[in-house]
Image (cartoon, rainbow, N blue to C red):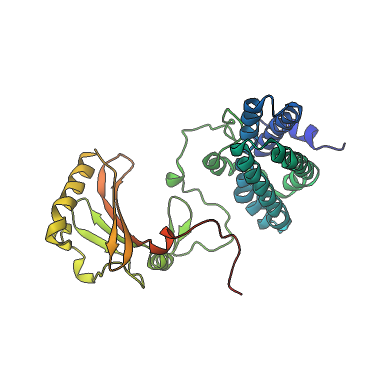
Amino acid sequence: MNTFLPTVEKLPEGHPVKVYYEEAELIHRLIDEIRDINIEEEFQKYYNAFNELATVEKRFVRKENQLFPYLEKYGWNGPSQGMWSFHDNLRKMIRIIEKHNAEKDIKSIYENLNFLLDNLQNLMYVEDTRLFPNAMELLNEKDWEEFYEGDEEIGWMLKEKPQAYPKPKETYVHPSEDHTVRDLPFSTDNTFHYDEGYMTPEQVNLLLRFLPVDITYVDENDKVIFYNRGEDRVFARSKGIIGREVRFCHPPKSVNTVLRILEEFKAGTKDVAEFWFNFRGRIIHIRYFAIRDKQKKYRGVIEMSQDVTEIQQLEGEKRLLDWD
């Protein structure tokens, strides 16, 4: 078989493609191991190997969110469409088998397992003969060097974290402190660099306005400094609360609870408080989150309120669009 492996073996340690091939070696080993197991007699051994194989989800997500966007940048959209759909089919197979595993339905496991294993092998053949060779042709070294932070956030199938690529010469820089200018397919004029990505003040305002939750931000001095102006608020708000002490923004019967939350948040003993109750025939969920900076210093609290009546009534699954 014409394989890309000899080329990959020459790549430096930690190179994203080399890591993909290390994972592929693990996948092939697990497939062979699972095929050799008598599931009825050695169910636990099979179960452990299958669960390790199911971590292939991390590989799928890295490809979809890391590799495919770079391929799109160079005009190759095929993987984002065809291969992503193939990933979804494999995900569905894994979920089906996980259900049979939970029920120890050996007959159904066998009926579905070979189909999954065969399709995983087919996928890696396409990766080896087409996806990774083309990716190496299209992407440049600077592109590959930008992968590690995102890959690390998603994770790998490997038990040991791969070496950073390129091998760091300086102290690791957290994404929130990384202001490296990268080539982007959109203008960054009039934008601010947030922990992840760039947005204009207008875009930030739109995002906050259209979030399906009510947000109120109280600073470290207990003053309300922001609330989002959504179309359907759970509780009424007006610009008169800006600059107001939070204790005066709640009914008297709730003030002691609010003050207790602030006290615990400031002391660092608690980080979250939540409540839910019936309000005018609707189920309301309220959460308070302590906000702290990188030095863990208390910087305020966010109150989030949401009408979860419809969410609470959800059952089963909905995977298809029902607009027609």
Q: Residue at x 61, y 48 (%)?
A: 66
Q: Foreground: 244 or 191?
A: 244
Q: Is residue 42 left or right of residue 176?
A: right
Image location of residue 26, percent across then percent down:
69, 30
Image location of residue 106, percent across then percent down:
69, 35
Q: Residue at x 20, y 42 (%)?
A: 264
82, above or below 321, in the image: above
Q: Foreground: 58 or 47?
A: 47
Image location of residue 152, percent across then percent down:
54, 39
Image location of residue 120, percent across then percent down:
74, 41
Question: Which quarter of the image is occupied by the C terminus?
Answer: bottom right
300, above or below 48, in the image: below
Please indicate, yes or no, whether residue 281 appears anywhere in the rendered image: yes
Q: Residue at x 24, y 61 (%)?
A: 225
Q: Quadrant of residue 34?
A: top right
Question: Which quarter of the image is occupied by the N terminus?
Answer: top right
Please indicate, yes or no, whether residue 14 appears anywhere in the rendered image: no
196, above or below 104, in the image: below
Q: Is residue 42 left or right of residue 318?
A: right
Q: Residue at x 65, y 45 (%)?
A: 96
Q: Is residue 280 left or right of residue 191?
A: left
**Residue farthest along the left direction in this orientation:** 252
Q: Foreground: 284 or 27?
A: 284
**Residue farthest along the bottom direction in this orientation:** 324
Counting labels gives 0
Q: Quadrant of residue 40?
A: top right
313, above or below 50, in the image: below
